[in-house]
Amino acid sequence: MNGPGWMEIVLTIAVTVALAWPLGAYLARVWQGERTWLDPVLRPVERVIYAGCGVRADRSQGWLSYAASFLAFSAASFVVLYLTLRFQDLLPLNPQGFKGVSPDLAFNTAVSFVSNTNWQSYVPEQALSTFSQMAGLTSHNFLSAAAGIAVAAAMARAFAAHRGEGIGNFWADLTRITLYVLLPVSLVLAVAYIALGEPQTLLANVTAHTLEGGKQTIALFPTASQEAIKQLGTNGGGIFNANSAHPFENPNAWTNLLEIVSMNVLGYACVVAFGRIVLARKDARALVTVMALFVVAAASAIYATETQVPPAQAAAHVATDVSMEGKEVRFGAPSTAVWAAATTGASCGGVNAMLDSFMPLGGGVAMFMMQLGEILPGGVGSGLYGMVVMALIAVFVAGLMVGRTPEYLGKKVEAREIKYAMLAVLILPLAILGFTAVAAVLPVALKGLANPGAHGLSEILYAYSSASGNNGSAFAGLSANTPWWNTTLGIAMLLGRFAYVIPVFAIAGSLVAKPKLAATAGTFPTDGPLFVGLLVGVILIMGGLQFFPALALGPIVEHFQALQAVAAR
Amino acid sequence: MTLATHPLGEDRRKASALVSSFSGPMLVRALGDACLKLDPRKLTGNPVIFATEIIAILATVSTALAVARGGDWGFALQMAIWLWATVLFANFAESIAEGRGKAAADSLRATRVTTKAKLLDHPSARDYTLKPAHELAVDDVILVEAGEIIPADGEIIEGVASVNEAAITGESAPVIRESGGDRSAVTGGTTVVSDWIKVRVTASAGSTFLDRMIAMVEGADRRKTPNEIALAVLLAGLTLIFLIAVVTLLGLGAYSGVKLSPLVLGALFVCLIPTTIGGLLSAVGIAGMDRLLKVNVLATSGRAVEAAGDCDTLLLDKTGTITFGNRMATEVIPAPGVRPERAMEAALIASLADETPEGRSIVELARGQGVDVQAPAGAEVIPFSATTRQSGLNASGRVWRKGAVDAVLKTLGMAQGEMPKELAAAVDRIARSGGTPLAVSEDGALVGVIHLKDVVKPNVKERFADLRRMGMRTVMITGDNPITAAAIASEAGVDDFLAEATPEDKLRLIRAEQAKGRLVAMCGDGANDAPALAQSDVGVAMQTGAQAAREAGNMVDLDSDPTKVIEIVEIGKQLLITRGALTTFSIANDVAKYFAIIPAIFVGALPALGALNVMGLASPKSAILSAVIFNALIIVLLIPLALRGVKYRPIGAGRLLQRNLLIYGLGGLVAPFVGIKLVDLLVSALGLA
């Protein structure tokens, strides 16, 4: 630990949060269908799309209809992607001549990309054709992100309405968010990545002759463009197995900074846009503060644990004060720590180090960030609606304490909202703990583990936390490309995305019809430090407490065991 | 705010006939009821306590099995005892809250009439036949004479009597009840002290006010309020989450080589689920109704009490609430060219038939100044009405009127500007001083203006400032003209006022406020208040008021004190605050319980986790037992708080939350660490585990 390291962590997060404001303002305009400076170019394209697809963009949908559109779109995407992967050998752009993907892997991968998770049970450069990567996966990197952001837009409209009915038009939202936000920003990022040294080519691979006379086949892909949307859309699915630890995906400190910023900025921007539309900018600022506080705390905790003298190395009298195992030398501990916090808080899942090699508590923090519900700042769009669910619960519990039926942003929080919020909150423990408990005693599942004991349990717990939270990062050490893992992780991803989002839609539907109340002196303030503290507490206690026993048997016991083992010597 | 610091309600601090405090027999009865409630079928409405009982049964079975196998059953037995105690304590909390209502209901039942009623053969005659009270039908007309108990709810159609309503209100000073107007309703079970009345029965046996009151205080048809339902959903959700957390430990534990007994997992589950608030939730609700009863207010539903806490706008009648009811005539200003005596005489004649305090004060003023005339023979009384806003006499072609200045001018066909300058100036002066000007006319000519003085009650300004800090807007309703209203409004410190208000205006104002998403509270007593009372979210009708008003409102104030609505709001808030505080406390407790139980159950197989035993509890068994004991005892310890309610302070939402979060949030985090440690010291000292 040192000053510059801390500075790096704080500055990275500060830059991200600061950039979220202009982006959020722009995003709000896109959500509202207002004019933007891209209109001259994009408006005609938008019109052609609407005309071609028969979308009536001005027709606002009720929550059921909006939810049905969202689900239908996701289901159709899943089918197309599944077929693309299964039959990639019959499709063009397959320079390496890969075979079709197995059914369970195709299921897992299709769910993974449709649910904005990007869990990868396979080694991409050894399994997927360029067509599968570009047409199949990259397109869903855009569309699943846009669908998530659309739900956030719908939630914003529900809060803004006064006895309203519709929460917007899903198809228009999907189109506008993709066209006006994801495509242009990705384009800029991709160009920047190319300038900073990432490859962008349709060539299959190059062959290198090493100094020792060996021959290496180095895979090449249109990396820069994939990298841009991978981070921006909190997808996280790398084009290479090593993800952003690979020198092509993340060659230097500048790309590293850009990738960290771009994986969190849109999550924060959704909150800012929400605040603008709901006319609650200060309240949105409080939500952003909560999110950023968690990321800072997690990054600090990981930085602190990763810069302790590793017990085993201390016992072996190795002089080091950083645990560099699994980390890239070009990034070092602080960059690795802030990345790990950002990617697990954001449901991104891209990694620039091997989390499996973190100190037990460092890995535990990463796991905990995902278990808290992927709302810090969460996936694009999904972070906002997840945070709103938490805020509703916080407001309900504490709002009672000021002696009124609680309100959040002018909407009364009543039995219906609480019912749906609790349903949503139930999903993560059910999926994470449920699958982990079964996998922990099932021989067919345990075959995939690389490590025994507490670390092995961490690997299982991490995998299901990542899948259920739609994060997609892996703890490594787990060979997940087996029917058991592909299927159960696929189901966990489905639950985490779709079982969660249905109650969220129901909340939006209930809120939109309610009158928008004016705040009075008796209204519980949701924009100050008090609310920030309260929300932090509720997220920790309601979102995190149930994972304490599981964490105790995984990373926590591993930590104490390591300490004891060293002491015993 | 308590009654003691309540400036407007000090006169109300009298013993209530309805509510007795705790007593030995009551506690015994509550304990008996608590045991009866152990029937699982009675617990299905409370998932948290239901789940606890299932674990208690499991612990009992596990004790029996241990005994049968000849194993170590001491620990299992203690666990079973404390788990049953948890359920019993929760039931006890509910029973004791209900017990207070039941005691009140018993005392009410005793006043139910069993005597015979004098059913009149003809409403205009005085011949009657005796008929048992419970056989009376609606619209029967009965005679009640001095010393008799009124056998049914009804409306006086003839006569005046003083009635002792102590049975209902606890107030032993008799009140006047008379036919016509807003004081004509009588309640079954009250006693006529003097004179006689003829009463038209308005409610048949079983649906009388007394019957409804008994049902209310007994909680016979107590339904969960919306807020209670929301909270119950939250608690059920938490219970499910912790069920998942505990059940999955079976798999996780098996992987880690930890042997977990169902008993220990059950204990962990009971400790984690919110038993504290789950056990106290219904007691809090019942106690809230009880507190209302204590200030002599009957609510028709718990929902109304909750709505009271939510109100944003409070409509207050000026008279009797903001100012002392009796406006006194202090002077009569004659019109130019009219002799002062003649103006006074006209004012007197116009007021002769006016039995209101204002009317009588005019008569007194005139007689005090030596002006005295009798009503002309054959005079026709023109009563005051809310639409004409004037009253007076017609006799042998002559007409006397007095009333609101604009109303009288309108009747005379005069525009405001046509009023003589001197009078206009007088009206202005009176109004601006906060008084009420009344115009007096005689035979179609304006003869003068009466000055009625209206005095604002002391301390109301502070009270309204408190309300503002609670986030409530106060709107003063008055029939006065805007200038008068403004003067009084600024003196009293209300946020807004509605002047020259007709019942329709009132209704319109309520609807407008509600359209803005606000909840409106008001009180009223007149029959013309009924639509507004029905429309408002919290409508408090006065017990002395018209029957229509009592039917329309969702609360009845037995003291008929219009300032009571402020107290009702506070009780509503207190109810919500108590629920929120106990929930927060309950959930915050879980952190300490984890730190007690998790190391205890894992430390055998994974000694490294002993490091999590931050409380330094003696042994795994004593740690688990201590957590369970603490979990049970905390319910008992919090029963007084649940019944008394968390004190409401009008300090603004932010500061109130900060305060309560500190006490119940942080307190809930820290208290169990201390509590469990203390129990553990005791348990290990006694060698219980």
Image: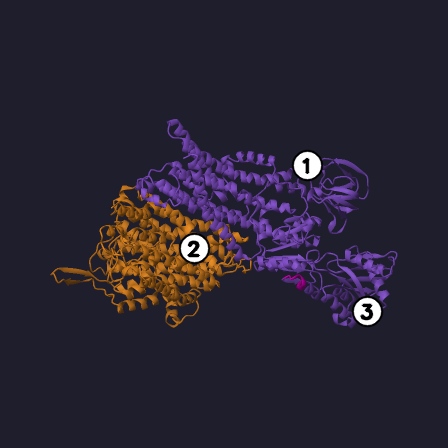
Chain colours: A orange, B purple
Residue closer to the observer: B643 or A562: A562
* Chain to which the residue tagged by mark 1 belongs: B
Q: CA distance from mark 3 to mark 2?
A: 73 Å
- x and y percent of residue B279 in the render? 50, 42
Is residue A193 left or right of B329 when viewed as pictured? left
Residue B53 part of the magenta-drawn span:
no
Pointer 3 local density, CA inside 10 Å: few below 14, some 14–19, many at least 20: many
Mark yes or no: residue A183 visible. Answer: yes
Q: Which residue carries the number 2 mark?
A: A536
Nearest to N terminus: mark 3 or mark 1: 1
Of helix, strand and loop, which one carries label 1? helix
Q: Which residue carries the number 1 mark?
A: B110
- x and y percent of residue B257 in the render? 30, 40
Amino acid type assigned to the residue bearing label 3 in the image:
Ala
* Chain to which the residue tagged by mark 3 belongs: B
Q: Which residue carries the number 3 mark?
A: B335
Amino acid type assigned to the residue bearing label 1 in the image:
Ala
Decide: is B621 above or below B425.
above
- x and y percent of residue A473 in the render? 30, 54
Q: CA distance from mark 1 to mark 2?
A: 55 Å
Foreground mark, 1 or 2, reads: 2
Where, by quadrant of the figure, is residue B208 drawn?
A: top right
Residue closer to the observer: B571 or A229: B571
Pointer 2 local density, CA inside 10 Å: few below 14, some 14–19, many at least 20: many
Pointer 1 local density, CA inside 10 Å: few below 14, some 14–19, many at least 20: few
Boundaries of the magenta span: B489-494
